[in-house]
Image (cartoon, rainbow, N blue to C red):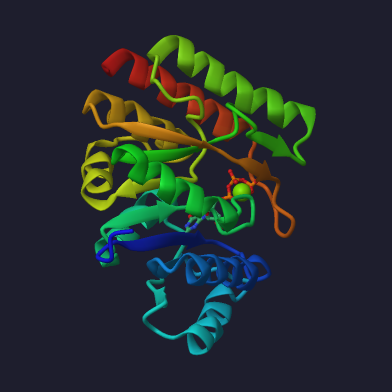
Amino acid sequence: MSSEDKYSILLPTYNERENLPIIVWLLVKSFTESKHEFEIIVIDDGSPDGTLEVAKQLQTIYGESKIVLRPREKKLGLGTAYIHGIKHATGNFIIIMDADLSHHPKFIPKFIAKQKEKDYDVVSGTRYSGDGGVYGWDLKRKIISRGANYVTQVLLRPGASDLTGSFRLYKKSVLEKLVQSCKSKGYVFQMEMIIRARQFNFTIGEVPISFVDRVYGESKLGGNEIFQFAKGLLFLFATT
Ligand SMILES: Nc1nc2c(ncn2[C@@H]2O[C@H](COP(=O)(O)OP(=O)(O)OP(=O)(O)O)[C@@H](O)[C@H]2O)c(=O)[nH]1
Ligand SMILES: [Mg+2]
């Protein structure tokens, strides 16, 4: 283990009051056990449920060097939340994950080990390879996710098995370059990141993860998201 490495975990939150204390506790536990340097950057977009107040309490428990708060006034979307978070990150590695407990911190040591194996630029969690999987989704959502992955595989041949997931580890410099070159917003953003990574010849490692549907809070995947995804996919197909 190289002692200079530091991992900045970006947690974008919108109405995650119940989930945030649990994910933070799990993260702190995991990093304390693995003895890696870390910071958790919470990017809350003015959640009406008071997520930010919960985050402030967590900061008093774990300290300001471990819990960094970078809130924004209102809901401005995930893509810009990442950009905002990266600006404040002090680690040389960045981990992006959802705060709704769909992504379990227990996989992070595997991401880190995988990254070191071949000094990968990106390590992507995958639900669609090895013993990865999805739990708690209904058939419709499974078909949509599988379908989106499959169509993208055929059209763009990205060289990664899970394109729409967002549980990933990046070298900070690599993530900065990817984010700058990505044009899409919304769900298609995760996919564009991987497509661009391949374009720039960045190396991508994969770690099988189990994805568990959110326990608290509401899901927003609807017809509009699917339409936006299809639009974004066609745009990438036409331009890359
Ligand atoms: N800061 C910020 N965070 C967001 C925004 N939209 C979603 N998030 C957070 O981003 C993560 C992923 O969003 P989710 O709502 O879980 O999206 P999803 O996993 O596709 O859908 P469900 O879990 O089914 O609702 C979660 O931690 C959300 O709280 C936003 O506009 N701004
Ligand atoms: Mg979710």
Residue 1 at x, y percent in the picture: 33, 58
Q: Residue furthest bottom?
A: 60
Residue 49 appearing in the image = yes
Q: What percent of the width, then of the height, locates residue 31? A: 48, 67
Q: Is residue 149 left or right of residue 173?
A: right
- Residue 114: x and y, percent? 42, 42
Relative image position of residue 90 (x, y in whole percent): 26, 67
Name the residue at 29% across, 65% down.
89
Single out the residue that lies furthest toward the front.
1
190 over 77 or under it: above or below: above
Which residue is painted at 41% across and 26% down in the image? 232
**How many discs appear?**
0
**Vertical position of residue 99 compared to residue 72: above or below:** above
- Quarter holding residue 101: bottom right
Q: Could you tell whether 238 is left or right of 59 in the image? A: left
- 187 shown above or below 219: above
Viewer-closest of 90 and 100: 90
Residue 97 shows in this picture: no
Instruction: Identify the residue at image location x=27%, y=17%.
Output: 239
> For residue 233, which quarter of the picture?
top left
Residue at horizontal 53 percent and vertical 87 percent from the top: 61
What quarter of the picture does the C terminus occupy? Answer: top left
